[in-house]
Image (cartoon, rainbow, N blue to C red):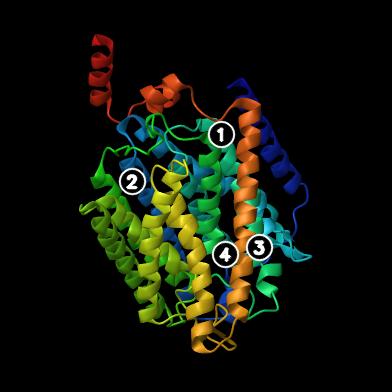
Amino acid sequence: MKKARTFLLILNILLVGLLLFGFASIALAADPTGAETLKENPEAPVDYVWVLVSGFLVFFMQAGFAMVETGFCRAKNATNLLSKNLIDFVVASLVLFAVGYGFLKGTDVAGFIGMGNWFLHGDSYDVGIYLDFFWQLVFCGTAATIVSGAVAERLKFPAYLIYTFFVSLIIYPIYAHWVWGGGWLSKLPLGLGHLDFAGSGVVHTIGGMVGLAGAMVLGPRFGKYGRDGKPRPVIGHNMALAALGTFILWFGWFGFNPGSTFSAHHLRIAVVAVNTNLAAAAGALTALITVYIKTRKWDLGMALNGTLGGLVAITAPAAWVEAWAAVVIGVIAGLIVVGGVYFLESRGVDDPVGAVSVHGFNGIWGLLSVGLFADGTYGVYSIEKPFVTGLFYGGGFGQLIAQLIGVVVVVVWAFGLGYILFKVMDMIFGIRVSPEEELAGLDVLEHGTPAYPEFQHRRTTLINAS
């Protein structure tokens, strides 16, 4: 733990140093009042309100993730999970503000990284840049928080802080620059370049693949596998919280996807909203029926994850497909969720909430579906031509290949860097809590505050009596 504290102290010193360096020279502001923007575009306030309200909905998804993860896990770790879902957005806010946003949306350097916009001051003190920063922040926070479910119930809290720091500084911003910041993936000479409308890859595959890396380095929870090596169910403590979290996330996704038009004047937002809802519904029903065929039980937990899988999968193609395609995408997403959960369990990977299957695997499917189902009626994040056309609408293989290249890159980038990060931390200070702490629960020993004090008191009494 001393090594972990030293590591965190170094990160704090580094952040403060960057802050002081960044303010050493203050350039003149661009348009901090918005007056110039309003002169150039009198309709700008409508778009600003649209994007901000959508961003507020995406921020509220943090609550959804917190409820889903807490409900799917055991009561003795509830405070720990709630703390992680709070702190990842806190860290993401500060790190993206200081440096990460510059890597994402600064001046492009060789198609690899952005430079500029440091600390949102100088020429970056502009209402347009601040609007874009807020949008990228809520997306970055979402990518970071996805991982907490995959590594739940056994990861040390300092390791979580450090992981969130590096995801917000490097893993999310640089890949997002390649796709959304004018980087090399967006300029592939295939189709119209690699496309990801609202983040199936940039947000969800990033989070899912880093989560997979963390789960693999950590190993499974005690009791997850029997002596025969077969997986055992580890029942979450509150399905009501998990269901509430899923409804919150479903609601927040109506900001996540339609808001990615970045304009209320793109009436395509109606198509995006309908597609988002249909994919979620198809994913839920498919997962529910699939598990029933296998177990003869109507599994609520899998239906909830099927909903989320459908939402993740439609996030990349939402603006480019028709309603029927959204349903097909959701159906396949539901199958991927169920198949992914059983596959990972069979390989000894313990993902307590199904985050890898929901976000990682379905993020990949969402990216590929653009190259298949894009119907040639919407442009590159624009209502203007050229329009995006997939294989099934006569567009050939170009767009599909561009999407496949992006899939390979995001998996290698996120899983590779995530695995290295978790391995290095594990070598330096050990990222997994002690067996005693894991069995007792992380709430009291790491945070000093159980989520359910009366339950904890009764549990301690029973343990002492035995």
Q: Is residue 330 above or below residue 411?
A: below
**Three-letter residue code for mark 4:** Asp
Mark 1 vs mark 4, CA separation in Å: 29 Å
**Three-letter residue code for mark 2:** Met
Cβ atoms under marks 1 and 4 closer than 8 Å:
no
Looking at this view, name the residue that lies furthest to the front.
228
Element on which disc 1 rests = helix
Mark 2 vs mark 3, CA separation in Å: 31 Å
Of mark 2 and mark 4, the one earlier in the sequence is: 2
Mark 3 vs mark 4, CA separation in Å: 13 Å
Q: Position of residue 121 (x, y in %)?
A: 67, 55
Q: Position of residue 387 (x, y in %)?
A: 56, 86
Residue at the spot of label 4: 132
Choose mark 3 or mark 4, whichever is in front: 3
The C terminus: image quadrant: top left
Of mark 1 and mark 4, the one earlier in the sequence is: 4
**Three-letter residue code for mark 3:** His
Q: Is residue 168 left or right of residue 83?
A: right
Mark 2 vs mark 4, CA separation in Å: 28 Å
Element on which disc 2 rests = helix
Q: Is residue 338 left or right of residue 159?
A: left
Q: Position of residue 85 (x, y in %)?
A: 44, 43
Residue at the spot of label 3: 177
In the image, what residue occupies the spot 66% across and 50% down?
170
Crowding around mark 2 (Cα neighbors within 10 Å: few <14, some 14 to 19, many 20+) is many
Of mark 1 and mark 3, the one earlier in the sequence is: 1
Cβ atoms under marks 3 and 4 closer than 8 Å:
no
Residue 67's disc number:
2
Choose mark 1 or mark 4, whichever is in front: 1
Q: Is residue 97 left or right of residue 329?
A: right
Residue at the spot of label 1: 159
